Each structure stands twice: as C-alpha cells, then as structure tokens.
Image (cartoon, rainbow, N blue to C red):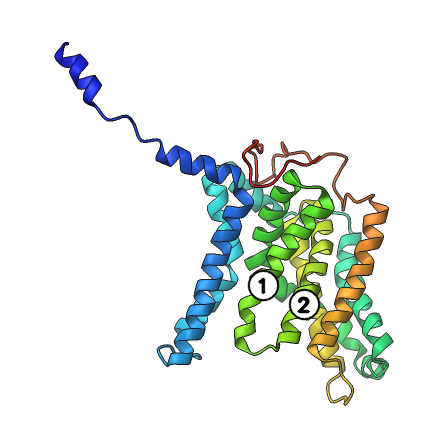
Amino acid sequence: MSARSLSSASAPAPSTEPATVRSWIQHHRLLTFTLIAYTISWSLLVGGFLGAQTGTLNPDGQLVGVMIQVAAAGPLIAALIMLALTSGRAGLAGLGRSIVRWRVNPLWYVFIFVGVPCLMVAAVAVFYPGLVTGLTDNWSLLYTKLPLEIVLIAVITGLAEEPGWRGYAQPTANQHYRPLVAALVVSIIWAAWHLPNALFGPTLTDTATHFLATVVNGFVLAWAYNSTRSVLIVMLLHGAQNASNGLIRALFDGATAAPTPSSYYLISALTFGALTIVVAVLTRGRLGLGPAPDTNQPDAPVTTPVGKHADVPPQR
C-alpha cells in the first residue's frame, strides 16, 4: 500500500454532526422555535423572580428591567435565530418586509381601531350596564387615548412577540396542519408562554382565564395574518386587544361594580370565540388562507418543505 493510500485510509471521516443538527432543525422548525423562545423568556423571568425573592437582585433595578425586556422579546429573538439557521438572508428579509407591510385592505384598520374596541365595550356592557355611564362621560377616550395606546402597545409588545408567533410560527404551522388546527397549535404555544407571569401576582383563576382568552384571541390574530401576510397588522391587532382592556378599566374608574380580571378574560373569550366561529364558517375553515397554502411565497419565512420525519404530520 502506498503512503498516499495509507494516509487516506487512516484519515478520520468528515464529521456529519453539524449537517445532522441542521437537518433535525429543518424538520422540527416549530418545536425548535418554541424551545428557543421559551428558554429565553422563561429562564430570564424565573431567574429574575428568584433573584428578587432571595435578595440577589433589586426588583426595581436596571438589570431586572433589562431582563424583563429581553424576556418579552423571546419570540422575536427565536424567529430571527431560526430564520438565520434555515432560510438565511432571504428569510430575514421576508420577515422584515412583512413587519412593514401596511398596504392591506383598509377595512383591517377599521376593524383594529374601531371594531375590536367597540366589540369589547358592547360585550362588557351586556354584563356590566354601568359601563354605559362611563362611556357617556368619557367617550372622547375612543378617539384620543385609545388610538395612541394601540400604536404604543403594537410597537412595544407587538414587535417583541408577533414576528415570532404570527410571522414565523403561524406560516410554519400552516404548512403542517389544517388552518384551524394550525391556529390552535400556535395559540396554545403563545398562551402557555405567558404562564411564568403567574409568579408575579395573578391568582390561579386569573391565570386560567387569561390562558383561555389568549388561545381564543390567537385565532383572530391567525385570521388577520393569513389574510394579509402582514406582521404589522397583527401587531396592531394585538395592540387593540390589549388596549381595549385598558380602555374598559378607564371607563370603570371609580365605579363600584367593575369586572374583575377573570370576568373580563371570560367575556373576551366569549366575544372573540363567537367572532372566530363566524369567520370559520364564512371562510369554510380556512381562516383567510387560500385553497392551498403557497409555501413558495417570496415573503414566506419558511422555505424548506416538510419531510416524512417532521415532528408534525403534513396537511391533508
């Protein structure tokens, strides 16, 4: 045997570990995204809580504030990591275009800034008639404070979460499941991500009803994203859902019979649950998607088809 042959025979085979890891990630994108988002957010929230409880961290200090902000952005960070690993610049650019896509049907803006608040005000007024008095005395909040709060929440909370939940997780789930099931999967992941908030004061009942309301609201957000492919729209819709809560609390300011957090969450779940049923019927269960999801969209964050080893079954 020649020296060259001996050298070739004794040389170690090239490592396939990086390729194997990348392949696993490609075939388990939704699971990997969820694990990254949860690891970032939960570790920081639980760590901050334990640090404050033991006196290691000042709960009002700058470090805890930074930890909370980074934890809130866990879904955004996870989406950026996943796109960098699986789609590169094209995927990142697609997500970026979706975040600034504002040219959609104008009715979406009417629904966000008028429809959502009016739905919640009307629904709460059915159970708490005293809201009518607060609305009569403070009706200017509807066109002064409310729109500003919707935009602020969209920029602060929506930008931290929605590029991950609806910008990445929703189109990924759409490739694997039927639209209603895909919306349910992402909504449950989104709702469960909030569970560490229970460490900071909410009762068990508040936590459970908030989980329910979040799951139901997720269907509406999925419908908005599927219909527009705009993360900006779901950021604003997320802002409208949260700002409506603040509006109603402001309208009940000083009232004796105001809804508790649990009551409000249940009313929200009933209201948006009814809306989801109407939308599901009108769209024949597609929630804004066309007859078949187009995975070759230039703006779709996920571009790799799902293989037989994926962690979820292909859509039928």
Q: Quadrant of the N terminus?
A: top left
CA–CA distance in space, label 1 to label 2: 10 Å
Depth check: give the residue in front, 256 or 202.
Answer: 202
Depth check: give the residue in front, 80 or 267.
Answer: 267
* Marked residue nearer the N-terminal end (1 or 2): 1
Type of residue at label 2? Asn
> Element type at marker 2?
helix
- Image location (x, y in percent) of residue 45: 47, 68
Depth check: give the residue in front, 25 or 82.
Answer: 25
Report the label total: 2
| Residue 168 in the figure: left or right of residue 177 | left
Mark 1 touching mark 2, by CB under 8 A? yes
Q: What residue sits right under mark 1 in the picture?
A: 157
Q: Is residue 163 above or below residue 242?
A: above
Q: What residue sits right under mark 2 in the picture?
A: 242
> Element type at marker 1?
helix
- Image location (x, y in percent) of residue 41: 48, 61
